[in-house]
Image: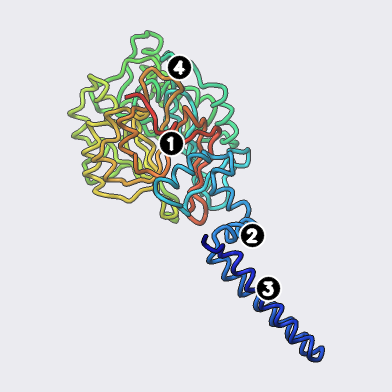
Amino acid sequence: MATDPKKKVQQKVKTQAKRQVKKAAKKNPVGFLIALIVIVVIVAIALVVMYFTVPSFKSTINDIISPSSSSTNNGSNNSGGNGSGTNQGSDNSGNNEDFKAGNITAADLVLGEDELKVHFIDIGQGDCIYIQFPDGKDMLIDCGYRDASNTLATGIKDSVKDYLLALITDNELTYLMLTHGDQDHVSCMDEVFDLFQVDNIYMPNILAAPSNAKLQAQIADLPEEKLALFKDPNTLTTKVYAEFFIKALSEPNCNIYLNVDENNTSNSIVIHDEQNTYNLTFYCMTEQGWNENTLKNEWEKNEISPVGILEYKNKRIVFTGDSNKNNEPEIAERIGHIDCDVLKVAHHGAAESSLQVFLDAITCEYAVFCCGTGNTYGHPRQAAIDRMSDYTALFRTDLNGNIILTISPEGELIFKVERDATQEQERTGPK
């Protein structure tokens, strides 16, 4: 049987200590004091040796020195922040010192100094993403959902409304982005304008053309200079897009910008602070793309979604809307290759979104799926999940509820979730 290295070191320390005591006892008190000092030195050396050679001893010392750090990074001893997901991530790619996890508390809604936070809000089958920038500005990307039976829900869920009101305490929203006109992205947008003053709106280059006579009259009464911004001949006829369109163009003291890039070498939407400490660049459909798109099918309606890359403290988060097989190859070509960290998975994890060519262009480590519990679309699909098999950890709003990602002042990624789920659960979806 192999000798326990810990016991071996302890025995050696005891033997050496006894020898020094015997020698000191035969001499004067000064010599005895020197012997005690020698013993202390020997013990210290032994402890150092044990720290670097006996893993269990090292772990115990680390727990004593920094218990919060140890429990945060060891999901098996912490029920928080997809703790089991953290363990699974370790199985996939080893310990990542830039990653931490833990459960959501009220304090997590407050932006700390030099922090940046992204809230993937559990709105059901849909997208609702809120960003807190370190300079105090903020942004909402999409706000719409369907319930579990695939029925379009009216108004923001009370839980989501309360969450947004807890986050936006000054009743002012700096930026609002609508990626495209699908109901699970836009259906609750009109109520956002009732809750908050919106300063800047980024929206599709699409006029609303509802069949409802009352809504038609309201659109006709909108300012002509704002209606003239929309050059594309295609229109959307849904009631929910018309309600958003009317509220957006009626918002006082608000700037309207369209999600259109002049060409594939330009970016018309770039958001940053004065010191460029953070930068959010959107890759929008080009003018040529808008001219060619007819909005005649779901793929064309989804492909107008801009892809945004948010950079802060050398970390990058990718936002995708419902981008898909139509536009992802072109965006990948425009990007070239950017080493990123976190992906908001496109189209809720649809099989024909988050293609490998796109994933190769952004090379992330973590992924977040915004999808509803028991949704009839079967999102996220196993095919999309499997393309992220080498990711450190996956998160899903249907399993985890609200998900908060914080980039700390030191550039650390910290995920926190409402509900835990194992990585086996996170990585399992319909075929």
Residue 267 horizontal/vertical position (percent)? 29, 44
| Residue identified by numbered label 1 | 200
> Mark 3 or 4 closer to N-term?
3
Badge 3: residue crowd in 10 Å (few <14, some 14–19, many ≥20): few
Q: Which of marks 2 and 1 is in front?
A: 2
Q: Do the residues bearing badges 3 and 4 touch, measured as CB atoms within 8 Å?
A: no
| Residue identified by numbered label 3 | 14
Q: Do the residues bearing badges 3 and 2 touch, measured as CB atoms within 8 Å?
A: no
> Mark 3 or 1 closer to N-term?
3
Residue 9 horizontal/vertical position (percent)? 60, 69
Q: Nearer the viewer, mark 3 or mark 1?
A: 3
User: Residue at the location (53% across, 36% down)?
Assistant: 417
| Residue identified by numbered label 4 | 148
Q: Residue 65 carries which label?
A: 2
Image quarter where the C terminus lies is: top left
Amino acid carrying mark 2 in the image: Ile
332 or 223, nearer to the observer: 332
Amino acid carrying mark 4 in the image: Ala
Residue 19 horizontal/vertical position (percent)? 70, 81
Amino acid carrying mark 3 in the image: Lys
Q: Is residue 51 left or right of residue 392?
A: right
- Is residue 298 depicted above or below 287 in this figure? above
Residue 270 appears in the rendering:
no
> Mark 3 or 2 closer to N-term?
3
Q: Is mark 3 on a helix, strand or loop?
A: helix
Residue 182 horizontal/vertical position (percent)? 35, 22
Q: Hey, which residue is sitting farthest right in the picture?
A: 29
Quarter assignment of residue 277: bottom left
